[in-house]
Image (cartoon, rainbow, N blue to C red):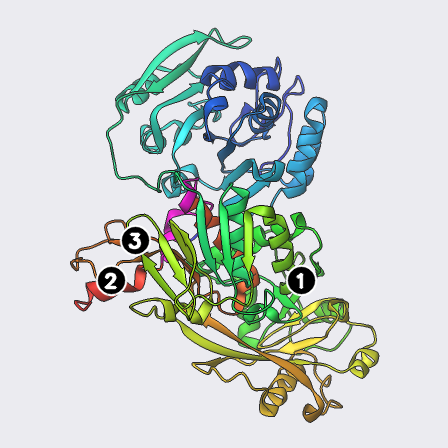
Amino acid sequence: MMSSPLVPAEPAAAGDGTPYSALYDDVYHATHGALTQARHVFLAGNDLPARWNSADNFVICETGFGLGLNFLTTWQAWRESKPRGRLHFVSVEKHPFRRDDLTGLLAPHAELASLSAELLQQWPPLTPGFHRLHFDGGQVTLTLLLGDAQVLLPQLVAKVDAVYLDGFTPSRNPELWSPVLLATITRLCRTRATLATWSVTGELRRALEDSGWQLQRRPGFANKREMLVGQLENLPVLRSASPASPPRRKAIVIGAGLAGTAISERLANRGWQVELFERHATPAQEASGNPAGILLPHLAKDDALAARLSRACYLYALRRLADLTDVRWSPCGVLQVARDAVHETLQRATMQQLKLPTDFVAFLKQDAAEALIGRKLAHGGWWFPGGGWVSPGSVCAALLGAGGPLVHPHFSTEVTALRQTAEDWLAFDVNGKLLASAPHVILANAHAANKLLPKALPLIPIRGQISYLPDQFQESMRPPLRHVVCRAGYITPPAAGTICVGASFDSGDTDLQIRSADHVGNLQRLDELLPGAAQDIDAALLDGRVGLRTAAPDRLPLIGTLPDTEAVAGNAATLDSLPRRAGLHALLGLSARGMVWAPLAAELLASQLEGDPLPIERELARAVDPARFHLRALRRGRN
């Protein structure tokens, strides 16, 4: 499913100054006060905050984010009520506002100024798909679905407690009030979920009643004589879209690289206790141990699954990095130079096809790219203004710090065996000593994971060697390199500390020794990036580092609960019906994109374990399900 380019909303006002949409010939909120309307219709209509005060997690689904005033008013009420749990607010918007326009539209609402500022700080580039934003230390989460509700809401995995139906007038925005969409929303709801809306049209009432809602009219707001509230009763018991919130929030995590520290922090943020095991004396000693990695998404003209997932992961990673403390990184921008003239043409065509906003990516012609970098280049390329470089080790340390006392790291301790009992998973060392027990185990130890499994996952080790450039190279660069430049290889700027050039990519190779031939290869990559830059560098004098990445055959990560390969499952099985190893999960196969993949991969797995709304589309979650390879084998008729 290719994402349709977003068409941003344009700010306008009705005659009385109320924000107005020319696309729908309707106002965004009542003339008599948007915040009062939000409180009267949506909060009071759903009996909030009383209902969320007794809940561990409360999920609201809204149709039509608009200016975000319903979300901001709800967030304000949540703060003031001081509930014990967490709030998830999911909202879909086909025509979102650009950040600058939204800033102006929210300015008149002074009582929400501090909350508006936090929202605007995290407001994403207007790219289609799911965007997850965290506030109040993760106690409040906003998941924005930017695009057509008819496409995105069927992709949502959530258990909804309250619904805000707040599209434009049904006669002018019929898609957002259609019986099919209302049925989709109903399927997302828990039994005894509630809804509220200012609309009382007969078509709406009949569609909701047909979906099982018991409706009631109440006094409306301002010039609306009535409004509508409803409760969902006697919902059929269906297979859960995600597991129930577990009674024991405890997990063993194996591996303290980017994947392991990221999932440890995400679980600790939800109140889980984590026993983190790492065979080395410190975190980030293997694939996550390079001095600097680069941050940029993968793009594809057809916007295929991998590209959509990469875009979501990249934007989430940037938000998480901005939120963590003591991380060495810089959003200095990344220029991805075209490989050749054919690739340059493809880059241009991709921009024309996807119509992505320039604050996410732009194509620079060769002369503009050269002016940006300050050196001659062979071609133009994609410019990612928010991309940059990051020290993976500093991220791992920051994640461990953010996890706080709920994360108990055990360094220089290798888990060599796992055994499942009726209640727990048990982890043992090489001498058979019991190290820990917990209901859940998460394998985040890359290629070493297969040593702990009865049947190996299709993980491919990939050897990567980077080269450190000498100080004289930095002195010879005039002007100094300020941005990351990449093509088949990459170079980080001097601001990253060590100037790294890389990297080799040897599939199936596990040799950890430095090779002179790979330094030569990295210098060739440098010369392709910056013609002439490598001419005075002696490969024999270079230092560097080797790391082993791990990838799946389809180059997508493995995130989720592992399949039970010993259980009986026919070739008609699906991902939903496939037997699983209860409590055994994977966060593996991050390949060379660990810094981009890991933060959202961890949020996805933590959401699955906790029963939260998922941060990505259902089909993207299925694409990274670690059971996908077992399912394909079954369908080919071999177990």
Task: Using the image, determine if residue 386 lies above or below residue 638.
Answer: above
- Mark 2 surroundings: few (<14), some (14-19) or many (≥20) residues within 10 A: some
Image quarter of residue 377: bottom right
2 vs 3, front mark? 3
- Out of 375 and 590, give the one closest to the viewer: 590
- Helix, strand or loop at mark 2: loop
Point 56% across, 70% down: residue: 280
Query: Which circle marks residue 421 in the picture?
Result: 3
Q: Position of residue 413 (x, y in %)?
A: 51, 66
As for residue 566 lying within the magenta part, the answer is: no
Sequence-wise, the earlier of marks 1 and 2 is 1
Disc 1 marks a residue whose amino acid type is Gly
Q: Position of residue 282 (x, y in %)?
A: 61, 66
Q: Which residue is mark 1?
A: 388
Is disc 3 surrounded by few (<14), some (14 to 19) or many (20+) residues within 10 Å? few
Q: Nearer the viewer, residue 27 or 61?
A: 61
Left-right relation of 105 to 416:
right
- Determine whether 18 is above or below 304 in the image: above
Residue 511, x across and y down, in percent? 50, 85
- Residue 565, which numbered label? 2
Please indicate whether residue 637 sits to the left or right of residue 333 in the image.
Answer: left
Please tell me whether residue 618 belongs to the stretch shown in magenta: yes
**Residue 258 percent location from the top left of the image:** 55, 61
Q: Which mark is residue 98?
A: none
